[in-house]
Amino acid sequence: MIEFTWPVRVYYEDTDAAGVVYYANYLKYLERARTEFLRSLGVEQDELEKVNNIIFAVRSMTIDYLQPAFFNELLNVSAKVAELRKASLSFHQAVNNQQKETLCTAQVKIACLHSQTLKPVSIPEFITKELGNDA
């Protein structure tokens, strides 16, 4: 399946007093990469909600912090669909520095939900086709 990479700069606000990225900020970096991945496929999540009453929500995540990132580093955050099911997506994600060292990895399961009922619904066909799988 398709792998997508998004650059992220570490800002001062992302770090603690020692200039090390605070652990929860990696979640933001991972979210940005997934959002930009969908955007690169022509899927705008606000439009998806307005037109199709569909939202994506994180159902579960496993994350491993391997090495720290520091203030002002440029990172590359990847998102690759590992599994595409009828109403969910699983991603393998990683954050790497410019030396290509892996700083953290994550397995993220995303549920496709109806925006009013918050019940699972099928991922629209136009999205599954863009992901290269007619699930």
Image (cartoon, grey):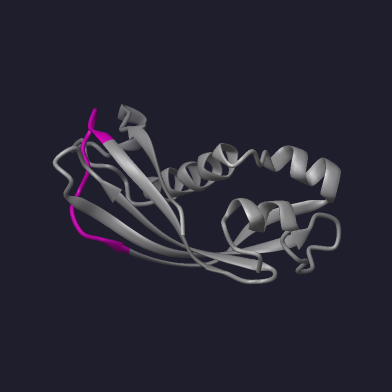
Residue beneath the point at 43% across and 49% down: 30
Residue beneath the point at 33% across and 54% down: 94
- Numbered circles on residues, count: 0
- Whether residue 83 sits left or right of residue 46 in the image: it is left
Q: Nearer the viewer, residue 103 or 52?
A: 52
| Residue 6 rendering spot, x and y as whole percentages | 40, 38
Q: Nearer the viewer, residue 66 or 110?
A: 110
| Residue 45 rendering spot, x and y as whole percentages | 68, 42
Residue 89 higher or lower than 27, as above or below: below
- Whether residue 100 sits left or right of residue 60 in the image: it is left
- Whether residue 94 sits left or right of residue 47 in the image: it is left
Quadrant where the C terminus lies?
Answer: bottom right
Q: Would you say residue 68 sits in the magenta stretch?
A: yes
| Residue 123 rendering spot, x and y as whole percentages | 71, 61
Q: Would you say residue 59 sits in the magenta stretch?
A: no
Residue beneath the point at 13% across and 41% down: 99
| Quadrant housing residue 124 | bottom right
| Quadrant housing residue 35 | top right
The kind of secondary structure the magenta stretch mainly shows is: loop
Residue beneath the point at 75% across and 69% down: 120
Residues shaded magenta: 64-74
Residue 5 higher or lower than 12, as above or below: below
